[in-house]
Image (cartoon, rainbow, N blue to C red):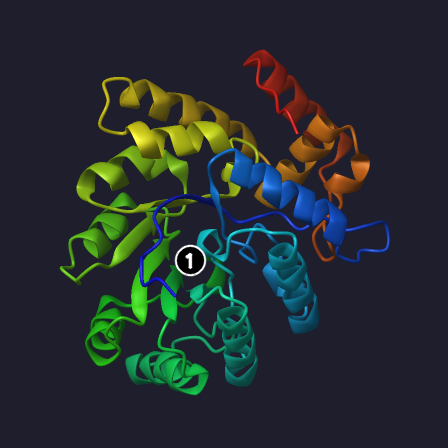
């Protein structure tokens, strides 16, 4: 297995559910291959994937189906962080055994105000129990959602104690200063991904690796294009165009907005179904999104 780190644009792939709220593997596989064809990699089981509404068995089954369909495991970063240590180990080990040792790890977010020793011990235990020398953990920093940040001091301890296993971080803090701090921390070959393409050009210019963004589900090729052309003269305009589209999807709940856009593009209302407790966009929200997309002449070719 290659020890190459990931970089570029990744989509936290939306999970399609049928009318009974069961994962739709066929739609999932088709959509993943469409995304790969648009030039982005796959961060399956992220926030936009409704990962914490999926069971261990459902995640394992979807990942197995995806790999059996011929998707390149080197282009896949499964989200494996759960509140339970044993379940995190089980899912991480399963992903690594299937050829996907590059994983995105939420902190154990149920207990708040965790000590640095607790966060360090949890992560070190995951690494030890998985016991796979190819394992690459990308920490998932999303304090607004998890209420459990990854402190710089904890990351520093992990990088030093587990060389090679701590590969990078996704920063969804929404604060450029935090992303920059991760980039400039000085950890060897530590890959930093911003959590929104709003900060993509800044991230790349500062030495970051790319972005893992919800809207990479519906605007993948232009996000991948900025990753590939950020040194070119047109990079500023590419960034401005990405922000304009991002803002349309931030006007309503992000997961429901992304799913609504896919449903519109595919002419298939099934795509708009989130799993409870999330709900679809209201008719008013859907109309606002559709009108906004039409105003900027934005379309998808699924």
Question: Which residue: 23% across, 66% down?
Answer: 152
In x, y percent, where is residue 131? 41, 83
The reply, left or right, for residue 23 in relation to residue 228 is right
Q: For numbered disc 1, what is the local secondary structure?
A: loop
Which image quadrant is residue 237 in? top left
The residue pinned by badge 1 equals 142
Question: Which residue: 16% across, 59% down?
Answer: 185
In x, y percent, where is residue 179? 27, 50
The reply, left or right, for residue 127 in relation to residue 33 is left
Q: How many marks?
A: 1
Nearer to me, 142 or 112: 142
Which image quadrant is residue 157 in? bottom left
Question: Which residue: 49% across, 58% down?
Answer: 145
* Crowding near the residue tagged with mark 1, few <14, some 14–19, many ≥20 C-alpha atoms within 10 Å: many
In x, y percent, where is residue 219? 52, 31
Which image quadrant is residue 102 in? bottom left
Q: Is residue 70 above or below residue 36?
A: below
Image quadrant occupied by the N terminus: bottom left
Q: Is residue 7 above or below residue 165?
A: above
- Residue 250 in view of the camera: no
């Amino acid at each position: 297995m290659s020890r190459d780190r990931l970089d570029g644009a990744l989509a936290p792939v939306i999970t399609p559910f049928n009318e009974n709220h069961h994962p739709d593997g066929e739609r999932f596989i088709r959509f993943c291959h469409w995304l790969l064809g648009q030039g982005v990699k796959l961060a399956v089981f992220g926030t936009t994937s409704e990962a914490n509404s999926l069971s261990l068995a459902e995640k394992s089954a979807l990942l197995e189906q995806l790999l059996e369909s011929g998707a390149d495991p080197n282009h896949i970063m499964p989200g494996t962080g759960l509140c339970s240590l044993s379940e995190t180990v089980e899912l991480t080990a399963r992903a690594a055994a299937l050829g996907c040792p590059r994983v995105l790890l939420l902190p154990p977010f149920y207990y708040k105000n965790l000590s640095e020793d607790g966060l360090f011990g949890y992560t070190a235990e995951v690494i030890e129990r998985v016991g796979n020398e190819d394992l690459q953990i990308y920490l998932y920093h999303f304090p607004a959602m998890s209420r459990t940040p990854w402190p710089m001091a904890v990351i520093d301890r992990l990088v030093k104690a587990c060389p090679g296993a701590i590969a990078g971080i996704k920063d969804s803090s929404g604060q450029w200063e935090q992303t920059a701090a991760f980039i400039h921390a000085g950890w060897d070959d530590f890959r930093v991904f911003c959590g929104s393409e709003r900060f993509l050009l800044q991230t790349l210019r500062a030495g970051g690796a790319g972005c893992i963004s919800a809207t990479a589900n519906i605007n993948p090729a232009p996000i991948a294009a900025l990753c590939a052309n950020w040194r070119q003269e047109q990079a500023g305009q590419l960034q401005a165009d990405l922000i304009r589209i991002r803002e349309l999807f931030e006007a309503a709940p992000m997961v429901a907005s992304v799913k609504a856009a896919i449903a519109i593009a595919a002419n298939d209302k099934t795509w708009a179904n989130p799993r409870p407790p999330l709900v679809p966009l209201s008719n008013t929200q859907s109309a606002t999104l559709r009108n906004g997309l039409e105003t900027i002449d934005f379309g998808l070719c699924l």
